[in-house]
Image (cartoon, rainbow, N blue to C red):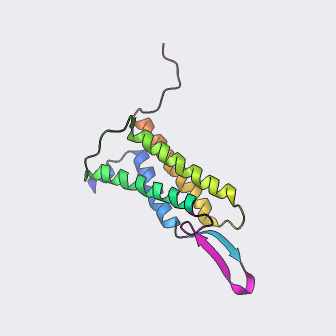
Amino acid sequence: MDKLKELSNGEKVIGVSAVVLLINSFLPWYSVDLGPFGDYSRNGWQAPSAFLSMLAILIGIAMGALVVVRALGAVELPEKLGGIGWGMAYLIGGGVAFLLVVIKWLGNTDFTAFGLYLGLLCTAGLAAGGFLTAKERGELPSSAPTS
């Protein structure tokens, strides 16, 4: 457990966002009130055209698992993933997950429930955590010209 305390701020944001996204995936993302017949709701795994939300949730789970595995040192992972560092990989993964949920939301704005909006926040947290991790590791390209 002491190794988990050594996580960077970005990795902590990724971990918390991934856990909340996983829990949120079982809450209603779409819901409609059918009056006397009750209500009908779908979670992130069942939502209309669930492929996008399922992919975003799986990306979040993978990112959270990678943060924990790297922190615990349970598996030897390379320092870089191909030509990019882990911080940049987290940033790309979080950005893709966020984009998938945004596309899902824009594709069907009818009957959206709080789970979809929480999913947007969680995936934004994954992207923000990836940005912070990439920044902490110095993997972001500098925008200032060097002399």
Horizontal and vertical percent position of residue 143: 53, 25
User: Which of 6/124 is in front?
Assistant: 124
Residue at the image position 51 percent from the left and 57 percent from the top: 55
User: Which of 107/117 is in front?
Assistant: 107
User: Which of 118/63 is in front?
Assistant: 63
Which span of residues is magenta-colored? 34-50
Relative side of 70 to 122, left or right: left
User: Which of 127/96 is in front?
Assistant: 96
Instruction: Establish if 45 lies above or below 105.
Output: below
Task: Point out the residue furthest to the right here.
Answer: 35
> Count of labels shown?
0
Task: Point out the residue furthest to the bottom here.
Answer: 36
Residue at the image position 50 percent from the left and 59 percent from the top: 57
In which quadrant of the rendered view does residue 43 lie? bottom right
Q: Is residue 36 magenta?
A: yes
Q: Confirm whether residue 133 shows in the render.
A: no
Q: Quadrant of the N terminus?
A: bottom left
Q: Confirm whether residue 107 shows in the render.
A: yes
Q: Is residue 71 magenta?
A: no
Horizontal and vertical percent position of residue 98: 56, 51
In which quadrant of the rendered view does residue 133 lie? top left
Horizontal and vertical percent position of residue 85: 38, 37
Relative side of 73 to 113, left or right: left
Task: Point out the residue furthest to the top here.
Answer: 147
Residue at the image position 57 percent from the left and 69 percent from the top: 46
Relative side of 61 to 114, left or right: left
